[in-house]
Image (cartoon, grey):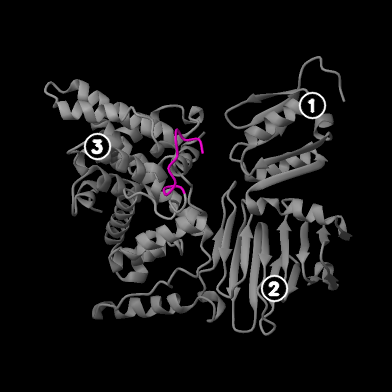
Amino acid sequence: MTSVASVGSGDSDNAESRAAAWVIRSSEGPLTAEDQQALDAWLASDTRNLGAWVKAQAAWLDVDRLVALDTGTANEPVRVTKPLPWRKMAIAASVLFAVGVGFVAEDQLPGRIETARGEVRRVALDDGSTMFLNGDTLLQVRFSSGQRRIVLRRGEASFKVAHDAARPFVVEAGNVSARAVGTDFTVGKATDGDIAVTVAEGRVKVTDAERGAPRQLVLDRDEQFVAATIGPRRARLDPREVQRQQAWRSGQLVFRGQMLASAAAEVNRHATKPVVINDSSLGRAEFMGVFRVGDSRAFANAAAAAFNGEVSETPDAFVLARRQNSPSH
Amino acid sequence: MDHQARLLWFAREVLPHEGDVRHWLAGRIRGLTSCELDEVIQEAYARIWTVDVERIVSGRAYLFVTARHIVGEHVRRSRIVSIELVADFESLNIVDDEIGAFRRLSGQQELARLHAAIATLPPKCRQAFQLKKFEELSQREIAGRMGISESTVEKHLAKALRLLMEAMKAPQTGAEDDERGKRRFWGFG
């Protein structure tokens, strides 16, 4: 590969173009030792280079936040430009790829979407539906002419489905599949294997193929079905509970009297630094509060303040414990 | 905050103000070239990056004050300074509307700004950028799709990023509808 110096000096050799070249070079994976050394030397040679580098990194990263807001309407589909004749074969294959979105057979679709911890992403699907991916979620979008199919591999996602009777919208998670025509519902796959389908609006037909005996049921608004490892259950939820469970879509986590331990588990799913509770009675305390997704520090501090505890920050966690000599609740 | 969180903070709290702070400096310091402005902004960014950003209440005010400080240092360091420059620099100490007047763009406005900037990119550069950011392909995949080498993809992406950085130098439009029209005193209003 060419050196970054030459990449950056292509048209105008200023700090910003060098910085941009470095950011692109390091965005694809760790730099080689040689590149790293060159970058360090460049940054050390002038503080303004550091400033340009910070700007370039922040700008590059911020694009992702904006792209997540994109519903796809303002954005023209990416077109593959006219191939050079001697590259015909390679291009023929890639044209197939590019037109695949939405109406060609499933394995050509590029629809694998993954979120990191702490990231909530909104994705507009080309049928007009919208989905929100919670943190640490992996799913695949497989649309064909007869069916809109989503396979949830991990995590939790919520769907606002555009009405299209001819093409049912089906979300599969393990043995459970949830089928909707036009509605708003959430499917979550917990780490312990439980799969929950929660309906916020409309009606969803759920099939649970567990143990060979398929079970079908229809969920209405504010109903939840959980295919739990200890056996399936169905419950009608308070509408506020449904809202609470979906607050992450707007970047918030809301707790209204959940046990602190389960609240912490929800916070940790989004946080880069988890909250650890070193006291089981503290973990059972009921907790209320509203937090920004990912803000495990604020959560730990609020919980400590609420229950007369204290937070100690280690390199990998916020450890929450009762204050010594405090009366137990 | 870790590195990434600091960058996101920077992108949200500092970068949106670059256009305004440039406009503010250029409007008050006569004869300031665009190149010198670049240097002031880069220096300011480097300084903001090295402080504990969690203690900064307003990224906008901090950026304005840091930029003023850097211009001041330059004025003091120079052996020969024109009377005009000193007078111009004094004008930066006058508290005015410009520091306070800011309305954050909505996500959709920001997105429209991004799309407008993307639309000005040269075709291949735009295509590589869209494949990278909107379709989340790797540089290798983009190279395969466009039928070009990976190092050319890297060049296209670097150019796209540089041009987006260039676009940030203009004050944000869209946020100015009511705020700029009304005269406000001392930022209360």
Q: Picture coordinates of residue B99 (x, y %)?
A: 41, 36
Pick the front one: A272 or B102: B102
Q: Which residue is mark 3?
A: B39
Q: Nearer the viewer, mark 3 or mark 1?
A: 3
Q: Disc 3: which chain?
A: B
**Segment colored magenta:** B179-189
Q: Main secondary structure of the magenta part?
A: loop
The magenta stretch spans residue B13: no
**Nearer to us: label 3 or label 2:** 3
- Considering the numbered disc 3 on the image, is that residue within a helix, a strand or a loop? helix
The subunit letter for the residue under badge 1 reads A
Could you say where residue B160 lies in the image, as x and y percent from the top left?
A: 31, 57
Identify the image quadrant of residue B125.
bottom left
Name the amino acid type tagged 1: Phe
Q: Residue at x 52, y 73 (%)?
A: A109
Name the residue at the top extreme.
Answer: A325
**Amino acid, disc 3:** Glu
Q: Residues within 10 Å of mark 2 (few under 14, many from 20)?
A: many
Quick check: marks 3 and 2 in contact, CB under 8 Å?
no
- Disc 3 from disc 2: Cα separation: 55 Å
Would you identify the image quadrant in which residue A200 lies?
bottom right
Q: Is residue B47 left or right of residue B174?
A: left
State the residue position of label 1: A307
Residue sitting at x 72%, y 51%: A191
Residue position for label 2:
A170
Q: Amino acid at mark 2?
A: Val
Q: Secondary structure at mark 1?
A: loop
Residue closest to the eye, A43 or A37: A43
Instruction: State the image coordinates of residue A238 (x, y, percent, origin top left).
Output: 85, 55
Q: Which quadrant: the C terminus of chain A?
A: top right
